Image (cartoon, rainbow, N blue to C red):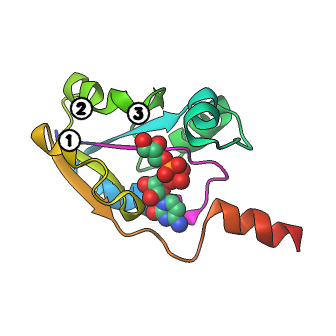
C-alpha cells in the first residue's frame, strides 16, 4: 500500500483544498492529512480558525480521498510522522515549494500547483462586500 501524507489548516474548506487532496490521493492508495490544531495555527501560523479542529477534522474525514486525519501540533513532526506511518510520499501545495526538501531523505516529496483563483482570505474579503 502506497501511503501519502499532507499537512494543512483546511479552514473554510473549499474546492482548492479538495483539488489538492484529490491529486494527493492519486499519488498512492492511502492519504493521511495532518491537520493543524487550533493552537498550532494560532501560535505558529498566526491563523485564527473559523471552525475548531474537531469540526475541520470531521469535514476532512467526509472527503472520499482522505483515509486518516491526524493532528499537526508542530513544524518538527513531519520526519517522525513519515517514519511512524511508513509514508512513501509527502505532498503539499507549491506555495511551499522547496520548504520541505529535507524530507527527501525519508520519502518522495511533491509540490503540487495550487488552485490559483481561490483562497480563504479571498472568500472572507468577498463576503465583506
Ligand atoms: N491549497 C491549494 N489551493 C488553494 C488553497 C490551498 O492547493 N487555493 C493547498 C495548500 O497548498 C495546502 C493545502 O491546500 O497544500 C492546505 O492549505 P492551507 O490550509 O492553507 O495549509 P497551510 O496553512 O499552508 O498549512 O506544515 C504545513 C502547513 O500546516 C501547511
Q: In the visual, does 113 lie left or right of 51?
A: left
Which residue occupies 67% across, 52% down? 12
Q: Is residue 8 magenta?
A: yes
Q: Are marks 1 and 2 in contact (CB under 8 Å)?
A: yes
> Residue 83, position in %: x, y?
20, 26
Tell us which disc is closer to us: 1 or 2: 1
Which residue occupies 61% across, 65% down? 119
Along the line of sight, which residue is nearer the eye, 77 or 29? 77
Which residue occupies 24% across, 32% down? 82
| Image position of 48 with respect to 86: above or below | below
N-term mark: 1 or 2: 2
> Residue 50, position in %: x, y?
74, 44
Q: Which residues are magenta?
A: 5-18
Q: Is residue 44 magenta?
A: no
N-term mark: 3 or 2: 3
Q: Are marks 1 and 3 in contact (CB under 8 Å)?
A: no
Q: Residues within 10 Å of mark 3 (few under 14, many from 20)?
A: few
N-term mark: 1 or 3: 3
Q: Which residue is mark 3?
A: 75
Image quadrant where one finds the C terminus:
bottom right
CA separation, marks 1 and 3?
12 Å
Q: In the visual, does 53 lie left or right of 21?
A: right
Q: In the visual, does 51 lie left or right of 110?
A: right
| Image position of 63 with respect to 123: above or below | above
Label 2 near ligand 1 (CB < 8 Å): no
Q: Residues within 10 Å of mark 2 (few under 14, many from 20)?
A: some
Q: In the drawing, what numbered circle is on residue 103?
A: 1
Q: In the drawing, what numbered circle is on residue 82?
A: 2
Amino acid at each position: 500500500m502506497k501511503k501519502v501524507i499532507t499537512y494543512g489548516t483546511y479552514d473554510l474548506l473549499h474546492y482548492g483544498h479538495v483539488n489538492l487532496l484529490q491529486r494527493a490521493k492519486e499519488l498512492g492508495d492511502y492519504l493521511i492529512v495532518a491537520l493543524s490544531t487550533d493552537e498550532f495555527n494560532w501560535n505558529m501560523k498566526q491563523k485564527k480558525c473559523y471552525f475548531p479542529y474537531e469540526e475541520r477534522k470531521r469535514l476532512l474525514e467526509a472527503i472520499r480521498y482522505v483515509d486518516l486525519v491526524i493532528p499537526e501540533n508542530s513544524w518538527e513532526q513531519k520526519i517522525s510522522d513519515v517514519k511512524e506511518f511508513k509514508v512513501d510520499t509527502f505532498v503539499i501545495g507549491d506555495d511551499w515549494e522547496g520548504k520541505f526538501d529535507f524530507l527527501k531523505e525519508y520519502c518522495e516529496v511533491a509540490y503540487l500547483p495550487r488552485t490559483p483563483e481561490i483562497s480563504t482570505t479571498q472568500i472572507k474579503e468577498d463576503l465583506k462586500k
